[in-house]
Image: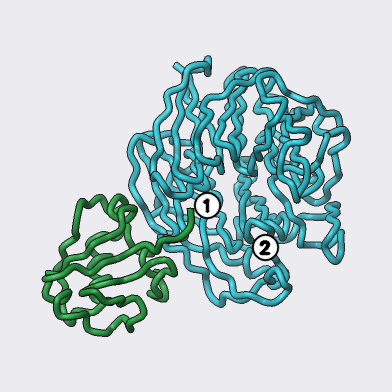
Chain colours: A cyan, B green
Amino acid sequence: MSGVRVLVGTHKGAFVMTSDAKRKQWDISGPHFTGWDIYHVKGSPVDPNRIYAAQNTGWFGQVIQRSDDGGKTWNPVGNKFAYEGVTGTHLWYDGTPRPWEFKRVWHLEPSLTDPDLVYAGVEDAALFRSTDGGQNWEEMPALRQHPTGPNWAPGAGGMCLHTILLDKNHPDRMFIAISSAGVFKTEDAGKSWRPANKGLHSEGIPDPNAEVGHCVHRIAMHPSRPDTLFMQKHWDVMRSDDAGESWREVSDNLPSDFGFPIDVHPHEPETIYVVPIKSDSEHVPPDGKLRVYRSRTGGNEWEALTNGLPQSNCFVNVLRDAMAIDTLESPGIYFGTTGGQVYGSADAGDSWAPIVRDLPAVYSVEVQTLR
Amino acid sequence: MIRVVLPAHLRNLARVDGEVKLEVRGPMTQQSVLDALEAGYPMLRGTIRDQVTHKRRAFIRFYGSEQDLSNEAPDTPLPEAVATGKEPFLVVGAIAGG
């Protein structure tokens, strides 16, 4: 019997929510790791019982947890994230050089083919990988050592590597995104990287069309169209149809083109979802209305999805890793808010209902489709 | 035998109740105690001190025998009462944050 497992990371622990394919009744377990920041929880696409969680606090630093039974039990694995070779400097907020310093793991991306291979995007921005199920971590240093590295600078949330896109059709190709350096692409499994930010335009940086320095919030890809990428930038929703070689804006009629998450329908590669937020300085939904926007045309023509979502006095945010879509025939969409609600839709966004309302601030939402 | 008291979050992580009792070889210092602690409980590596530099994490303090040992050199001998197990070595999470 098919069903789904939603993995939620919050300010004070992780939660695991399961349901059958109807996605009406939910069994919720947690908090796991109570009191810790859980930036991300994600399962292996090839072994759904294998789940990785990034756990940290300012007191005790970074811990990585692994479950081999679908989130019922967890064990800490390796947590040594040491930069390779000369650490070097990046730019601080005031423009002065600052040594790279590991702070936390933002994102864990399990391999599409091997449950023991998992990538970690960290702050200060770098990419690590483990080939033994998280026991040992090694940096993929060519990214951090890119010639533009000394000019990378943090966004307001820190200089984080937050997005890792893998492509089953091109195993050596990978896209990553850093706030606020932008998108980087490798086609040789991480041995070399180059910026993939042509067409991005960001006001407020010295050169609005610079090769690096863009605050990319999230990128998404449909597995059947690996050359088409969608991006929620700080401001602007963008798309690329040439594997990140160039980008064009597709924000059009959105009430705000600022936001954090972006995701793609599993069966319709031109159907995408964003959650507009009023502005970078306010971080609340426009007009107090929590609306997911859907485009069935790959951007430019957007419709508001509001059925079941609060349409007054709602002032929560939805963070970059806090939206996910299952792959059932009628896909389920899930997102979590900084107010602690997790909303779900079992009909591709046409209607919504809260799965849970009173969690700590939600940092991340992922979903596993169980068959 | 050294007695170590961990903060609640680290007791949970290490899956221990109450004090941790450690056999420490060689001189009784902050470093030798933490080495023995991390050898017995590898999941605590990096949570009290940096795994590479061994520098104490900023919000962690060490106390023993009514003394703040946090800023002592890692190879400074521990107070007699701690070294003999009469009193525990306290690892404390600073009161900060929310």
Please determine whether, in this image, residue A2 is positioned above or below residue A321. above
Kindly identify which residue carries mark 2. A154
Question: Is A310 situated above or below B91?
Answer: above
A275 or A340: which is nearer to us? A340
Q: Nearer the viewer, residue A30 or A50?
A: A30
Which badge, 2 or 1, is on the more N-terminal residue? Answer: 1
Q: Is residue A202 above or below residue B86?
A: above
Location of residue A317 in the rendering, given as x and y in whole percent from the top left corner: 66, 40
**Which type of secondary structure does the marked residue at label 2 adopt?**
loop
- Judging by the rendered image, the residue that carries numbered circle 1 is A119
Identity of the residue drawn at 58% across and 37% down: A339
Q: In the drawing, does residue A77 fall left or right of residue A93?
A: left
Residue at horizontal 24 percent and vertical 66 percent from the top: B37
Q: Amino acid at mark 2?
A: Pro
Name the amino acid type tagged 1: Tyr
- Count how many numbered circles sit on residues in the image: 2
- Percent x, y of residue A342: 56, 30
Q: Are marks 2 and 1 on the same chain?
A: yes
Q: CA distance from mark 2 to mark 1?
A: 21 Å
Near mark 1 (Cα within 10 A), the count class, few <14, some 14-19 or many ≥20, is many
Q: Looking at the image, which residue sits at the far front? A: B66
* Image quadrant where residue A254 sits: top right
- On what subunit does the disc labeled 2 rest? A
User: Quarter of the image containing the N terminus of chain A?
Assistant: top left
Query: Is A306 positioned to the left or the right of A14 in the image?
Result: right
Work out whether residue A195 or residue A173 is closer to the camera in this orientation and state it: A195
In the drawing, does residue B71 fall left or right of residue B3? Answer: right
Q: Secondary structure at mark 1?
A: strand
The answer to whether residue A53 of the structure is visible from this angle is yes
Picture coordinates of residue A15 (x, y %)?
Answer: 45, 36
Q: Residues within 10 Å of mark 2 (few under 14, many from 20)?
A: many
